[in-house]
Image: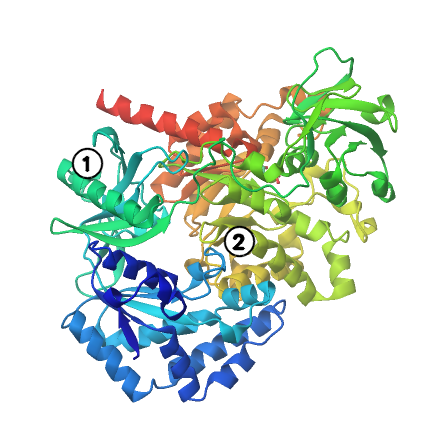
Amino acid sequence: MAVLWLDEIGADDLESVGGKAASLGELTAAGLPVPPGFVVTAGTYRRFIEDTGIDEELFEAVDVDADDSKALAEAEARAKELILETEIPEDLKEEILASYEEVGDEAFVAVRSSATAEDLPDASFAGQQETFLNVTGEDLLDRVKRCWASLFTQRATYYREQQGFDHDVVDIAVVVQQMVAAEKSGVMFTSHPSTGEPKIIIEAAWGLGEGVVSGSVTPDNYVIDRASGEVTDVEVADKKTMYDKDPETGETDEIEVPEDKRTERVLSEAEIDRLCELGEQVEDHYDTPQDVEWAIFEGEVYMLQSRPITTIADSDGEAATADGSGAKQASKSDEDGDVLLSGLGASPGIASGAVRIVDKLDQLDKVGEGDIIVTEMTTPDMVPAMKRAAGIVTSEGGMTSHAAIVARELGAPAVVGTGGATETLSDDQMVTLDGDKGTIREGVETSEETEPIEEARPKTPVKPMTATEVKVNVSIPEAAERAAATGADGVGLLRIEHMILSTNKTPERYIEDHGEEAYVQEIIDGVRNVADEFYPRPVRVRTLDAPTDEFRQLEGGEDEPHEHNPMLGYRGIRRSLDRPELFKHELEAFRQLWEMGYDNVELMLPLVNDVEDVTRAKALMKEVGIDPAKRRWGVMIETPAAALGVEKMAQTGIDFASFGTNDLTQYTLAVDRNNENVAGRFDELHPGVLELISQTIQTCREYDVDTSICGQAGSKPRMVNHLVNEGATSISANIDAVRDVQHEVKRIEQKLILDSVR
Ligand code: PEP
Ligand code: MG
């Protein structure tokens, strides 16, 4: 039998129908209203590749070195060609088409992959496989084959290689299910997703559910007390867009919500009652709280998917996991210790340990687990030592310096800009640093171990729904896991400097020693770490922007020019445009990542001044084979010239502009961000900076260009307030600030809505 009907299968059939289909089968059997459909089983895929004899060639084609992106791309293309160009055996074809007829004559169906290797994480593996909506009989077999072929995308192949799964043991089933031409749809949590309290939470929007599930549409939110059945909270969102079927082509389109329905409440009391009834039933069936996708068509509620909620905290309120190896951070502060030094509290937390003064790179070995690094200024090469350290103290630098940024990402307490830490402190001295107050005290204070990833995980996992997206900044790929644990809507800035500089060589020297391909691969691997962690949430990757003084620390750095003020010097896009051959290698890495299927990657250009910088960069993108019209790319607004000239840049087709307030502030106020003598004058909330931001947002809105912030100020409530009020599209914050920023954004948005109705 090539197919099994949903009403014939259940959880025991996981191996032959995959996780998605098995769960639909379970729901059907429990009497829940699931749209009718069938599954082209994993065995059918097997028979297809074996009976037609393509199996050997297929598995040989995908047996490649996972680190060779070219080979991965070729493997994907060959596998797809083999599968798409090979005829499905006649008897299988007939059975699939006959089953389709049974679903309905000329019915529109959804065709979805249902992976059988469910132990592979969704985001990195199953999530990559194909789904086709509104398919008719004519295209059905082709779409089924495309689902099969999606087992061999570059990402999937790479992932299996990395995880040690053989390519020939992973099978794929395909669900073919009647489409519900949803008028309304959304998700429902049958119990509170963080506390497990008996509350049903429903999110609802107009049209098909794709928008709610992917997060691109802000839905209404309803909270229902399960005991009384009462709706205790309703938040009606401004629903600007919805997903719908194009009546002519059958394709799924994102369209504007008609004006009169934008702020109209989606669900009636009766519909909420029915959803709750089904929610109770499905939770009873599984005996555990569920996260359900649902749709409503002509007054009928349908259930499209159900999965257990995994975010509910244990009864003691602790989130699960923690595998040891935590940073050593003190939890209790002792106000009586003698303050030896003070500076800027750059990364919160308290840490005690032995001082290790580091002034040359070869002294990094002396930094052991739990020590306190004390240095003039950190450099990218110090990151491995910074990871071992319990805390970081620098003499130089401000809140936006390298040390501050990296320490925050590592979750290590830090005090920067102390003036003379390397002279005042001495090796082996026991000290306690307070990253909130910016002090270093004599002696050790009681310490407790904490786990940086768990620290980053929101204490209340219910994410405040906001129309303004809240993203997170990542500077070292190793922080990706912590960053993803925050539940942010994506990465607003991924700095690639560390991927290069942590090799301890300048790009030029790296290429001299290892070749161009290895350089491209270094970037691809670094970005991939983060893009995988966040997929399908967007990751905005910035091209190289390191000042010459950072390059000078590295092998090959002796060739770097000496500059009076590197911050005003040879960095960012100006350096890239001056060395186009080198820049093209970075662009080539983007091209390959996109080709591999990392469609969540976006490209961002740093330190542009005017439209000429942008058009020259765009021309180089085209030279390496990137079609800028098909990819999401944009610029950072970091100089007053860029802010004032954004209109012309908007006309070049950029998709977004992101405020780099660390630089925008230093260039607007003439305050070197790395100079502790003027740190007191570094004010991102200065009216001059705020005015440049307001003007830029206004112009970008006219051109439908998204606006965002990725400078450190995005973590400050007053800046968040300014941006949301001015209409920025997103805000990218530090790992430790994401949850607070989400709440702040929500509060401001609610105030805006209230003001508009008052
Ligand atoms: C900025 O300037 O605000 C920014 C985010 O870039 P960087 O800190 O890397 O210069
Ligand atoms: Mg900058």
Within 10 Å of disc 2 (Cα), the crowding (few <14, some 14-19, many 20+) is many
Question: In x, y percent, where is residue 338?
Answer: 78, 13
Please report the residue visible at 27 percent of the width from the left and 48 percent of the height from the top.
282
Q: Horizontal placement of 307 versus 503: left or right?
A: left
Disc 2 target residue = 531
Q: Secondary structure at mark 2?
A: helix
Q: Does the beta carbon at disc 2 come under 8 Å from ligand 1?
A: no
Question: In x, y percent, where is residue 103?
Answer: 18, 69
Quarter of the rendering containing residue 379: top right
> Identity of the amino acid at label 1?
Arg
Quarter of the rendering containing residue 240: top left
Which is nearer the eye, 208 or 360? Answer: 208
Q: Horizontal placement of 429 versus 396: left or right?
A: right
Which is nearer the eye, 642 or 215? Answer: 215
> Identity of the amino acid at label 2?
Ala
Disc 1 target residue = 265
The CA span between labels 1 and 2 is 36 Å
Ligand 1 is found in the corner quadrant, namely: top right
Determine whether 246 is above or below 636 in the image: below
Determine whether 507 is above or below 408 in the image: below
Question: In x, y percent, where is residue 64?
Answer: 60, 75
Q: Horizontal placement of 316 versus 354: left or right?
A: left
